[in-house]
Image (cartoon, rainbow, N blue to C red):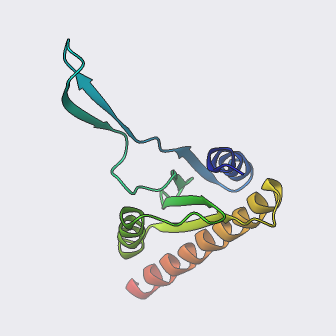
Amino acid sequence: MKEVPFTHALIVALGHGHGLMLHRQNAGCLVVRNEYGEPERRVDFGPPRGAADISGWVRGLGIRVEIETKIAGRKRTKEQIAWANACVRDGVVYCLCEWRAEETIEQATARCATEIEAAVQAMKRDLSDKIASLQ
């Protein structure tokens, strides 16, 4: 049970018939060393620390979608929780998808795809209600 295959399976599952454009967000760092092998500086690349594993939008609407994937027993970091809170505060669809120990990858992917689709539909209804109240 590994997180990266689950993340990829979820992107593939959501890319077919769900109206989403998604990609995996890779983050990391590189330590630049001098000719003696001593570290000189660190270069961070990718999204900010804590950013969700999957990012994208709802096609045709531009509603932002952020998906954090976890395998059973793994917890989010403080930075990931802060990112989730910022997403929710700013009106982004944020979903935490966990691959439970008793599930196959197919079961987890199907369940999470349904949860994400429900969250997107809820956001669409919320936005529709907000627009209607302005008219």
Q: Is residue 87 left or right of residue 59?
A: left
Vertical position of residue 27 compared to residue 81: above or below: above
Q: Residue at x 78, y 54 (%)?
A: 105
Q: Is residue 67 left or right of residue 8?
A: left
50 lies above or below 116: above
Image coords of residue 4 (percent x, y): 62, 45
Residue 63 in the image: x percent, y percent? 48, 61
The residue depicted at 51 percent of the width and 60 percent of the height is 65
Percent from the top left, x then y, of residue 106?
82, 55
**Residue 45 percent location from the top left of the image:** 33, 37
* Quarter assignment of residue 98: bottom right
Left or right relative to 118: residue 88: left
Q: Nearer the viewer, residue 45 or 57?
A: 45
Camera-nearest residue between 40 and 54: 40
Q: Quadrant of the C terminus?
A: bottom left
Which residue sits at x=68%, y=44%?
A: 5
Q: How many marks?
A: 0
30 vs 21, nearest the viewer? 30
Q: Quadrant of residue 8?
A: top right
Residue 69 or residue 134, whichever sits in front = 69
Residue sitting at the far top: 35
